[in-house]
Amino acid sequence: MVQVYVARAWGWRGAIGVHSWIAVKPTDAPAFSVYEVIGWRARRGMSAVAISDRAADARWFGSVPKIIADIRGDGVDDVIARIDVAVRAYPHAHEYRVWPGPNSNTFTAHVARAIPELKVDLPPTAIGKDYLPNGGVVARSPSGTGFQVSLFGLLGVMVGVEEGLEVNVLGLTFGLDAKKPALKLPAIGRIGFD
């Protein structure tokens, strides 16, 4: 099984943003492995990418997580192997910036782009999701169902079947989702159907 989670960030950041992570459990594994980026690790000279065995749905500094992607069944072990490769290829493993990125949401978006089967639609509160790796300007959307143009995560546009239409201004996302009708707003998230 593969699950992608978001939970309100710790401290003042939680007022406007979320932290995201990916949890995997291969066939016959005794526990979940969780992949995430944690800023203090980079500040201490370590890789910001943390791989740990912990509860997939554990609270993030008191915030209850929400599943935004969930796949399981036949073929998921191959997906998990590809996720591990994408995690280890993350180009910003020794960098972390809350705004505009790279951060935990940049990491999750990077892995999601490599694994389009996840169809991850990161919420508008996932600040850093629009920061493209290696200073890129054009990329597939994290869900793999569209494309985006982004200037350093500060200004951009994304169009995708899963994401709908999103406009990023100074790292804040405004958008419309036609598939699951909703308005997407910074700090608030989605207003409409979930």
Image (tube, rainbow, N blue to C red):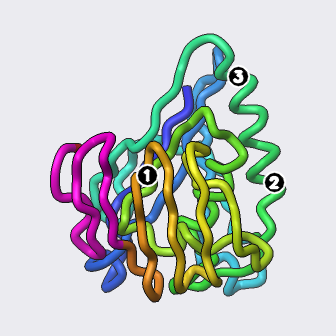
- Which mark is drawn over residue 163? 1
Distance Cα–Cα, label 1 vs label 2: 26 Å
Residue 78 makes an appearance in the image: yes
Residue 20 screen position, x and y as percent: 48, 58
Residue 46 makes an appearance in the image: no
- Which mark is drawn over residue 77? 3
Could you say which is closer to the camera, residue 79 or residue 176? 176
> Hey, which quadrant is residue 7 in on the image?
bottom left
On whether residue 108 falls in the magenta region, the answer is: no
Q: Write the residue at 81% across / 54% down.
A: 88
Could you say which is closer to the camera, residue 92 or residue 35? 92
Q: Is residue 93 left or right of residue 121?
A: right
Q: Amino acid at mark 1?
A: Glu
Q: Write the residue at 33% across / 72% down.
A: 174
The kind of secondary structure element at disc 2 is: helix
Distance Cα–Cα, label 1 vs label 3: 26 Å
- Above or below, 112 against 135 in this view is above
Of callouts 2 and 3, which one flags the residue occurring earlier in the amino acid sequence? 3
The residue labelled by disc 2 is 88
Magenta extent = 174-193
Distance Cα–Cα, label 2 vs label 3: 17 Å
